[in-house]
Amino acid sequence: MSNILTPDIRAVLERQAIEVPSWAYGNSGTRFKVYSTPGTPRDPFEKIADAAQVHRVTGLAPAVALHIPWDQVDDFAALGAFAAEQGVSLGTVNSNTFQDDDYKFGALTHEDAAIRRKAIDHHLACIDVMDEIGSRDLKIWLAEGSNYPGQADMRGRQDRLHDSLEQIYARLSGEQRLVLEYKFFEPSFYHTDVPDWGTSYAQVAALGERAMVCLDTGHHAPGTNIEFIVMQLLRLGKLGSFDFNSRFYADDDLIVGAADPFQLFRILFEALRGGGLEADSPVAFMLDQCHNVEDKIPGQIRSVLNVQEMTARALLVDRAALSAAQQSGDVLAANAVFMDAFYTDVRPALAEWRESRGLPGDPMAAYAASGYFERISAERVGGTQASWGA
Amino acid sequence: MSNILTPDIRAVLERQAIEVPSWAYGNSGTRFKVYSTPGTPRDPFEKIADAAQVHRVTGLAPAVALHIPWDQVDDFAALGAFAAEQGVSLGTVNSNTFQDDDYKFGALTHEDAAIRRKAIDHHLACIDVMDEIGSRDLKIWLAEGSNYPGQADMRGRQDRLHDSLEQIYARLSGEQRLVLEYKFFEPSFYHTDVPDWGTSYAQVAALGERAMVCLDTGHHAPGTNIEFIVMQLLRLGKLGSFDFNSRFYADDDLIVGAADPFQLFRILFEALRGGGLEADSPVAFMLDQCHNVEDKIPGQIRSVLNVQEMTARALLVDRAALSAAQQSGDVLAANAVFMDAFYTDVRPALAEWRESRGLPGDPMAAYAASGYFERISAERVGGTQASWGA
Amino acid sequence: MSNILTPDIRAVLERQAIEVPSWAYGNSGTRFKVYSTPGTPRDPFEKIADAAQVHRVTGLAPAVALHIPWDQVDDFAALGAFAAEQGVSLGTVNSNTFQDDDYKFGALTHEDAAIRRKAIDHHLACIDVMDEIGSRDLKIWLAEGSNYPGQADMRGRQDRLHDSLEQIYARLSGEQRLVLEYKFFEPSFYHTDVPDWGTSYAQVAALGERAMVCLDTGHHAPGTNIEFIVMQLLRLGKLGSFDFNSRFYADDDLIVGAADPFQLFRILFEALRGGGLEADSPVAFMLDQCHNVEDKIPGQIRSVLNVQEMTARALLVDRAALSAAQQSGDVLAANAVFMDAFYTDVRPALAEWRESRGLPGDPMAAYAASGYFERISAERVGGTQASWGA
Amino acid sequence: MSNILTPDIRAVLERQAIEVPSWAYGNSGTRFKVYSTPGTPRDPFEKIADAAQVHRVTGLAPAVALHIPWDQVDDFAALGAFAAEQGVSLGTVNSNTFQDDDYKFGALTHEDAAIRRKAIDHHLACIDVMDEIGSRDLKIWLAEGSNYPGQADMRGRQDRLHDSLEQIYARLSGEQRLVLEYKFFEPSFYHTDVPDWGTSYAQVAALGERAMVCLDTGHHAPGTNIEFIVMQLLRLGKLGSFDFNSRFYADDDLIVGAADPFQLFRILFEALRGGGLEADSPVAFMLDQCHNVEDKIPGQIRSVLNVQEMTARALLVDRAALSAAQQSGDVLAANAVFMDAFYTDVRPALAEWRESRGLPGDPMAAYAASGYFERISAERVGGTQASWGA
């Protein structure tokens, strides 16, 4: 059975790393209600400790993305040292310009130069953090836009966005990158300043080589062929990172692969086809999810396993046979080659391979058996549980 | 100019009443941020006072819908008396089963009979309030559903929903009605227990004559022809009420008519065509909106005016000419009759008519000139501003 | 391996039958182009012969649905006898009121009583065919609607539809049924007279017990939870049949399971959960697809196999474990039980089981090896290839 | 009343020109049925004659777009001369690579170099026509894509598309331009080779300055903010042309402004805001519609009038007041300025202005009174009516 994972396939799987977001371990929810759960972290150290559990049982999640100011600490060196102790590192730094009253009508795009300055400075401060913890990527998601036609000068905002990004980009050094996320809608409901990959691409192309696009799998219009965008951005050399999650309707932020596993397969196949899984690929793989009703740490374990399993399936596609069928115009044969890989049950072979590497064959069971949840539930009493507000 | 408002049209406009929601005067927002504003009410009395301003300048909003527990007070008689002093009355009572930890996995549909009992009892308590304040309608919006395939037994939940509704319905008396709202998605992202008009219709039809459907204009799948549903529910005798708002994407809760004014025109025309604007119509017209970034009281004034203006346009449709064009298969002529009414500028005639009734011709300006906002901003200092949590 | 197919599962699979549409064997396409292919049938007999190939290699497709007038023949008894010779039977009769100039503005809903009469009579003629060939179901898909707001009196059309259906329903006898399909849009682009399950349900409920709803999997708004509708219609006792196909965007009519295999799994699970796979179930399973660019007979073979494979996966769900997880509110455990079945590779076990029943383990390969396609390509020269027009 | 049309506004309206498509005068429909009508043109000359009627009564449609091969004639000089006699000119040339059996799996993207060559040569032949008739724009809409995951190598196709376009672009001379249309889906249902503005932009940016994007208002995902794309393409200097029409669901090809008049207003406002209505603007305004159920010539007259009326409304926006409200963050005031223009009834002033220019005040009535339709219905007997196939 495990023969299906050839050495070439194993080589890719071995280097696969999926960054987990610190905020996945805090409470999250909808505008209607945020449910709290026992054991939820009260500070960034506890979030890191939780994230480390995911890596411990999967070997897949060696880095943790931070969100500033949610993960602001006095001593980032101490946080980095703590992470290292736990067996993980600090990764991408995410800025936040959507929770300050000043940003009600925009941040990097605001009509008022003083507010724009404040937002730019926040990003410069994020780069300071990156310098301190040795982070490569500054990820920018802009919650900016408007709710009513006429409310905003969309064109002027686009120009101001360019100016702001240029100042931020100029502050990067070495291998540091700026990664610009796009989002179809929410929290704005009429227009969003970076609503689609085309806008993100046009903006980062105007900055320079180390500015890239972040593709969040939940941020598209209904029916969008996301793997096409993956293909196109890789072709244009501008796919900087993935924010993985899944959706049925809007930005549902469900566990990656939960809503449409076949779509995840297609996305990973295009990532592979375009060189995104190569050792020198510029593509960062990250999760960006909310665990509103399910347990958080197991939710993250399930997520990285979903990506791993689907990557294995994508790697199983017989590309020579696929190419031959494509060239001969044999639609059913080409589709059959593709589906054969998708329908192959890779789970037993992956379990065996995990064990061969000293990892638990069943990471979900291993975590459940570890007693970690019982321990944090007992220990983390009092204090304020982390959520999007802190 | 004002001749376009014939006596027949004026008769309809004169009896038009649009209920406003108490929660529109509190703060609201998205899962990312709720912005607060000066002058926001701290309790139900202050909400009523604000709502009364809308009626004062428009003559259109004589009733205020309550939300329990957000508007829970010790003495509802006192609240009702205060409303009467302010020139308005208390209207529909809205229940809430989405903000208690017990309801994480359902309320009226929960697997656990004890939780179901608690949710049913909450509705019975709401009916007690209705009895006390003389309210006709109990409006039920169910936030219930699931986020992941397999998480819930959808069929079992549907049966339990029927049982729960039956117990609630049995408690109604006199002219009281149960109005069941449907919603496509959110806060649940895989399945919603009452996702469409068909489900709401099937559930209320199984209860009895005083159970009706509530149509919230923002709760449909992309592309849905909402006026068709208005037509169908009126035809089936089951349109109990409208929750007006507008949307570009999801349940955006924007000002009614803001996103697609022509759609509002078509909806009001079907309401008119189906008898929904008759004096004895069972249809209640309500707003259900969030003013996330715009001023709240003016936002409500703008909303009721939008409904009034669009009702006037719907009333202007030359129905004899329309019918003749329809019967002759003259597509362009029929559409032209329809569009002619939509493109007619009814605003000057409405302003003149308002003044003839002792109301301000320009209610927005009248409110702005009233000094009310300045007064509440100065007076309402301290305390906790109302929002969805309270 | 084959042990995964328990005797209980095999019992369901053994009685599974999926009706194939005669029109799938003719040419089809888009408004832009219909591509023709060698070997395409020129008459209903050749269509039946092709359909029989699907059953020959799969044992899954014992009946062929007819479409009148596309399959009109002088001697239906002869067509039935030919089908029997080929090892299949004639099944559902589909009416057509969308290709006659008289129906430009409606058929069963038309303002003109004479055109309505003509459309009703067409359906009565279809029932005559049913009587002759022993068909149980009259399937009605209405292409009626309008393209422009104001063009049509939607309410009046709904009432006329009821009257027309009542006359058709009255003509049914014995076990015969009327099955009413709904469709979100196309060929009409503003309103469709039966756009959603709610309308179909309301219409058939007003007729009687032998009037049922047909659910075409491609006929919904973006994001619609189709399995919820399956559940609801089974609960209401009104799910008469499935028209299977798949879609990414609109009514794409792709091979069932091709666009979203996980959705097909969920649909079949709800069909199973609601009793739709029981021996006495009223639910008919049919395909309704277009093979625009792929080979037609193999396209149909692939389709029935997709339904069979996904049915096997749905049957593999450990329902006791699922129920336990649901009742305990363990979201991840419930989802895991569900996904475990979906990710199980049932193909080897099904191949073995097929062979045990005297069928080819690999029906696609068996058909390819049969030489049938080469034979019809050589023989069917001249004449007019069948398509939607004939 | 007519004072609302200031001299500045009139200056813009006077130079407004909307190109009409020759194919709008032929029969069109859906995959289910194409209805024919009396008087439908049988050849390109008759199409030109019909198009000239639109210009005669509106003064708005001085050019007619051709479609090759549908409008192929032996003597284009004669066609041009005929057009000149009729008072119009020949405009944009549209290529067609979607109705030849060779193009079943692609044209400019095909795996087979010979088919690609054929498709490129077709475009070179179109440029020959442009040279002959003095046309500026070659418009390319690609119907290419695939129906099933795995069917096509999307990345390879994108590269081949670039190569093909480069060869076509190289053949342009003088002021000639290549305009590349994008489309979300149809006739392909899994992937489309140019599905979004980002892809069209990336492709034309790689060609050179005279390669531009064509924005068809019906070719977007549900919910897309189209005016944002207008803004962005104007900002990037790459908006070459509009294909106007309107939609409720897919590419419905309804009369522009019919489905969502407010959207057309927003689009025209952004076109204006971005300089697209200036005298030297590179933006061509065209219709691309189907008149499936309505009369064709009046359908075109209605369409150009809709664009004119909405342009007048967009010009009425008080931009100084809008800008002031935007800068002060007064959401409701900004929206009110915007809506005030939209709700102004510009029709009487436009009628008066038309008459002042020697045009009929009511072009629809003038055409109806002209007897043209009765004449062509009587004269055009026999022959084959034009449709998309010819």
Image (cartoon, coloured by chain):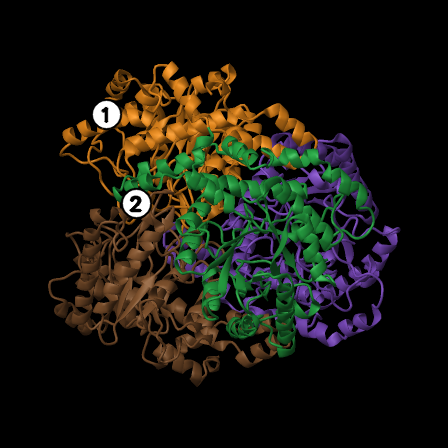
Chain colours: A orange, B brown, C green, D purple
Labels 1 and 2 within one chain: no
- Residue C27 against residue B227 in the figure, above or below: above
Query: In the image shown, does D11 or B175 lie closer to the viewer?
Result: B175
Q: Chain of mark 1?
A: A
x and y percent of residue B284 in the render?
33, 71
Q: What residue is at 25 percent from the left and 46 percent from the top?
A: B104
- Secondary structure under the numbered disc 1 in the rendered image: helix
Q: Quadrant of residue C71?
A: bottom right
Query: In the image shown, does D379 or D303 lie closer to the viewer?
Result: D379
- Tell me how many marks there are: 2
x and y percent of residue A124 in the render?
35, 28
The residues bearing labels 1 and 2 have C-alpha atoms spaced at a distance of: 25 Å
Query: In the image shown, does A352 or B376 lie closer to the viewer?
Result: A352
Query: What is the three-letter code of the residue carrying label 2?
Result: Lys
- The residue lying furthest to the left in this view is B74
* Mark 1 lies on residue: A45
Q: What residue is at 66 percent from the left and 67 percent from the top?
A: D294
Residue C263 appearing in the image = no
Q: Chain of mark 2?
A: B
Of discs 1 and 2, which sits in the foreground?
1
x and y percent of residue C167 in the render?
56, 74
* Mark 2 lies on residue: B33
Query: What is the three-letter code of the residue carrying label 1?
Result: Phe
- Left or right of B164 in this view: A107: right
Residue A55 appearing in the image = yes
Query: In the image shown, does B85 or A157 lie closer to the viewer?
Result: B85
Q: What residue is at 23 percent from the left and 35 percent from the top?
A: A386
- Asked if disc 1 and disc 2 are in contact, CB closer than 8 Å, the reply is no
- Secondary structure under the numbered disc 2 in the rendered image: loop
